[in-house]
Structure formats: structure tokens, C-alpha cells
Image (cartoon, rainbow, N blue to C red):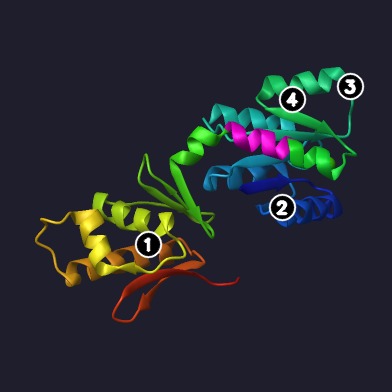
Amino acid sequence: MNILIVEDEQALAQALAQILKNNGHYTDIVYDGISALEYADGFPYDLVILDVMLPRLDGFGVVKTMREQGNSTPVLMLTARTTVPDTVTGLNAGADDYMTKPFDTSELLARVNALTRRTGEVILNKLTYGDLTLELDNALLCSKHGSVHLSYKELGVAKMFLANPTMTITKESLIVKVWGTDADITDNNVESYISFLRKKLKYLHSAVSIKNIQKIGYRLEVSEC
Ligand code: CA
């Protein structure tokens, strides 16, 4: 899962990121409320872990704005305050759950799992690999740097790659799956579409690239950054 951590106490933010990373999640960290909104708007996270007391805009303001903008990403609020009114404020503002600091690792992971399970239906409409998310419903290819719209055939090609991210995809299988067996199409056409997708990956500053596997086809590759 891709999780955005919004927490101005840097040591706590790093600790959270480490725990989540150890459990197979990807994380981004931001330290204030305005940056949180920018990140949440720019990338389809599976979960936002959101502190209440933050510089620039507090956690209540962040979740309220996200919901007003139509962003339905689950939000887990972290609060040092244990009073009922604050909890109610958070949930009224659109948070899905809250957790009081300090918390233990197992409690955090249990809540993260519960909240990310809730988005299961949405996840079926998305394919993710490396820093890329492909939204199948609206043909959008996204990285944390932005998103691009794909044409119908580009979507078909991208879907083949992201559904089989570690496999070598042959030109023949792309032709059959994307264009169909009756299609009058050559390897050159496939190469054109690969080149379109490469341009879009470059535009997204993605760590994922399409590698040529000589005489066979293509495979995705993620560069370390
Ligand atoms: Ca804080």
C-alpha cells in the first residue's frame, strides 16, 4: 500500500515510516498540513496517517478540505489528546478512524490493515507497481509527480505490463491481448505504442521504465532512487 504520513515530529514520522516499510508498505512523509493536501491531491494514496497538531493547517482542516475536494482516501488521525470532543471533531471532519499517541506497533498495523481493506473495491480498479498507479476506470497513469491520460490502446498496453510486472511481455502477446488476433498490425505499431508509454513514464519522472528484451519483447524495470 502507498501511505502518506503527515506528522511534524520528525522522529515519530521516521519511526512510523520504518514500521510501515518493514510491513511492506511504501510511504511518503510531509511535515505540515498544506503539503499534506498537495501530496494527497497529487497521488492516489491508499491511506493517510494524519497528526492533528500541525504547522500551517491542522489535521482537522486537512481532512475537511480533502473531503470537500472529493478525495475519499481513508484517513487515520493521530492525536495526543484523548478527550472525546476532539475525536468527534476528527470523525465529523471526515476521518475514518483515530488513534491516540503514544500507540504500540501492533495497534497501528491492525488499524492500517482494517482501513486499507475497506478500500478493497477501489483497489481492484487500480494496478500499482513501483511508484506507478494505473487507474483503469479513467485511464490515468499516475506517479507522485503527476498523472497522464492514456489512449485506449496505451491503456491496454500499460495494463498488460502492470498486471504482469515481473514478466517479459512478448510483442505477440501484446498484439493478441490489445489489438486482437484479427488485427492488421505489425511489430512497428507495437514499438510506437511502447515509445508513447516511455514518453509518458518520463513525463511522470517514474522510477519504472520499459526495458527491451532482445528478440523477445519487453519487461518493466524499477530503478533505485
Ligand atoms: Ca504534531
Q: Amino acid at mark 2?
A: Asn
- Closer to the chain start, of discs 2 and 4, is 2
Label 4: state its secondary structure: helix
In this rendering, the label closer to the viewer, 3 or 2 = 2
Residue 90 badge:
4
Mark 3 lies on residue: 83
Q: Amino acid at mark 4?
A: Gly
Q: Is residue 115 visible?
A: yes
Residue 37 as seen in the image, left or right of residue 197: right
Q: Amino acid at mark 3?
A: Thr
**The magenta stretch spans residue 114:** yes
Label 1: state its secondary structure: helix
Residue 79: where, in percent of width, then height?
83, 33
Q: Residues within 10 Å of mark 2 (few under 14, many from 20)?
A: few
Residue 63: where, in percent of width, then height?
66, 31
Residue 200 badge:
1
Mark 2 lies on residue: 23
- Closer to the chain start, of discs 1 and 3, is 3
Q: Magenta part of the protein: which range?
A: 111-118
Q: Quadrant of ligand 1?
A: top right
Mark 1 to mark 2 CA distance (whole Å): 31 Å
Q: Is mark 4 within 8 Å of ligand 1?
A: no
In this rendering, the label closer to the viewer, 1 or 2 = 2
- Closer to the chain start, of discs 1 and 2, is 2
Residue 162: where, in percent of width, then height?
42, 56
